[in-house]
Amino acid sequence: MIYRSLSDLIEEYLKDFLKESQQVEINRREVAKHFNCVPSQINYVINTRFTQQHGYHVESKRGGGGYIRISKIQVVNHADQIDHMLQSIDRELPQRNGATIVKTLAKEDLITEREARLIQALMDKDLLLEINHDEEKIRSKLLRKILNELKYKR
């Protein structure tokens, strides 16, 4: 039997709606009730699995009639998609966020699985710390350079 976490189930549930349309609007409390969990679990899933690096835009309105709107980022071409990824990279880039971007590149067939593994190896925390103590800054610069090369070399 394959064990799937509650977060995986919630993510799958929301992505099923997004297969039908480019946007879904949910009530956090209702989704939490559906999964018999606390509303903060829904927040966790949205904040970690529906980010700009994953190709989503999230809006929320708090309060009694509040909602969370998740939209797939519409891209015209690969350069547009890469621009969205570039916008999500700050001056410093934690390893987890870099890994998410690389996985998205592979998922969208902008790079191969092999290229993804090579890029992940270059951005490895231990490797970058050996080079310099500002590993997140180096990772940010590396990934920006790679994305710009992908954008103009395709």
Image: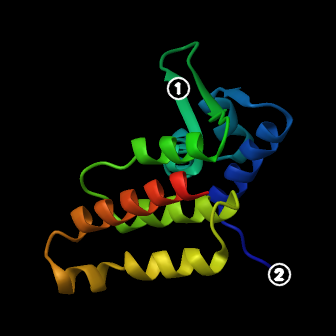
On the image, the x and y values in percent for residue 34 come to 74, 40
Seen from this angle, which residue lies furthest left?
A: 133
Alpha carbon separation for disc pair 1 and 2: 36 Å
**Which residue occupies 53% across, 59% down?**
150
Is 146 on the left or on the right of 32, as rendered? left
Seen from this angle, which residue lies furthest front?
A: 153
Mark 1: which secondary structure? strand
Residue kind at label 2, given as amino acid type: Met
Q: Residues within 10 Å of mark 1 (few under 14, many from 20)?
A: few
In front here: 7 or 37?
7
In front here: 95 or 29?
95
Residue 1 numbered mark, or none: 2
Q: Is residue 73 above or below residue 153?
A: above
Mark 2: which secondary structure? loop
**Which residue occupies 55% across, 80% down?**
117
Place residue 73 in its image quadrant.
Answer: top right
**Which residue occupies 28% across, 85% down?**
126
On the image, the x and y values in percent for residue 40 come to 49, 43
Residue 59 numbered mark, or none: 1
